[in-house]
Image: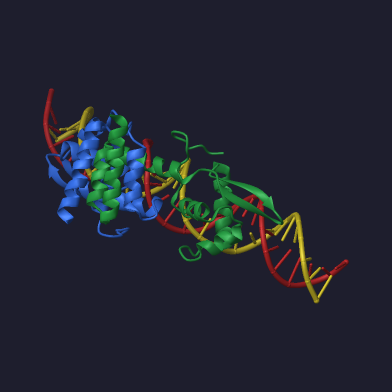
Chain colours: A blue, B green, C yellow, D red
DNA sequence: CCGTAAATACGAAAACCTTCGTATATTCTA
DNA sequence: TAGAATATACGAAGGTTTTCGTATTTACGG
């Protein structure tokens, strides 16, 4: 098994992210169920999805267990870890290491609703209080 | 010329980012100057860097103009655009469209200094004021 | 028990990215 | 001016990702 691990988690590819998102949202699925669930965003054939799952299984991104004649696949890593990893990567690669710049960029680039802004402010204030 | 444009900007690859970072920091460079400047982070051969620049030129990521016997290459897109694009992409791909979650993730994952926190809070407050 | 449908395994083609090697053109310089 | 540097152009090898096609196995219905 190839091992591209860097810190602790393998960074999923684009296709793998699609599948993981589905698994995170829907919980463990069979290949068929995944295909159906993905129907709206991806027009993948059955064997394509299966292949991805096999690869992801090898990489340790999903687990699988028998379920009748088929298998149930489940995400083996949680969404937060992946998010944290991608953020860290992005900060290093395009924000020259500055998390602050990333946050600024996100706020600037964005469609952040007033409610979200308020929530973000709350979080920041919380962090500041915690660290005081 | 291949065209992978999605919104308006072509998303640079890993190697391309290294080069762009250099160009953003140093301004227009010859291939040789780039090689030297990259020496610390990348051990690329001359022709490798040249090849990247040729590809990037085709993609519209850099411009070039004659300069003596050689050429001067310059970034054709600014850092902010690229940062914005990558953030937007990340939000869509791993934060299910929520900029807020990205910001939260960044703050959580991170080594953000107290000063940076304060600056971020200021920005948020500013945005809130602007929108009020 | 047999054939049909559904699931899995295997392998491979095409695209993209990284990385050079080599060949060619251009320019100093001794 | 001939040879040595230096630049550029071209092409190709090797790795990863995406995407299926086909072949094989498994299970159920008649």
Which quarter of the image is occupied by the C terminus of chain A?
bottom left
Rendered image quadrant of residue B94: top left
Does residue C5 appear left or right of residue B33 in this picture?
A: left
The residue sitting at 53% across, 53% down in the picture is B23
Percent of width and height locating residue A74: 17, 44
Percent of width and height locating residue B125: 27, 39
Percent of width and height locating residue A43: 33, 31
Viewer-proximal residue among B2 and B111: B111
Does residue A27 appear left or right of residue A10 in this picture?
A: left
Viewer-proximal residue among A33 and A123: A123
Which quarter of the image is occupied by the N terminus of chain A?
bottom left
Q: Is residue B92 visible?
A: yes
Q: Is residue B93 visible?
A: no
Percent of width and height locating residue B111: 27, 57
The residue sitting at 16% across, 42% down in the picture is A72
Exactly how many numbered labels are in the figure?
0
Q: Is residue B124 positioned above or below B73 on the image?
A: above
Rendered image quadrant of residue C23: bottom right
Viewer-proximal residue among B11 and A1: B11
Does residue A91 appear left or right of residue A81 in this picture?
A: right
Does residue D27 appear left or right of residue B121 in this picture?
A: left
Viewer-proximal residue among B54 and A113: A113
Q: Is residue B118 positioned above or below C15 on the image?
A: below
The residue sitting at 27% across, 49% down in the picture is B118
């Amino acid at each position: 098994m190839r091992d591209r691990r860097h810190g602790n988690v393998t960074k999923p590819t684009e296709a793998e992210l699609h599948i993981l998102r589905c698994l995170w949202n829907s919980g463990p699925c069979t290949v068929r169920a995944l295909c159906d669930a993905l129907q709206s965003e991806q027009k993948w054939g059955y064997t394509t999805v299966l292949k991805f799952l096999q690869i992801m299984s090898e990489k340790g991104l999903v687990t699988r267990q028998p379920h009748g004649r088929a298998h149930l696949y489940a995400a083996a890593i949680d969404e937060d870890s992946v998010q944290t990893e991608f953020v860290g990567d992005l900060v290093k690669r395009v924000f020259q290491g500055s998390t602050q710049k990333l946050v600024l960029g996100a706020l600037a680039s964005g469609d952040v609703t007033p409610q979200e802004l308020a929530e973000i402010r709350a979080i920041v204030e919380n962090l500041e209080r915690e660290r005081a």
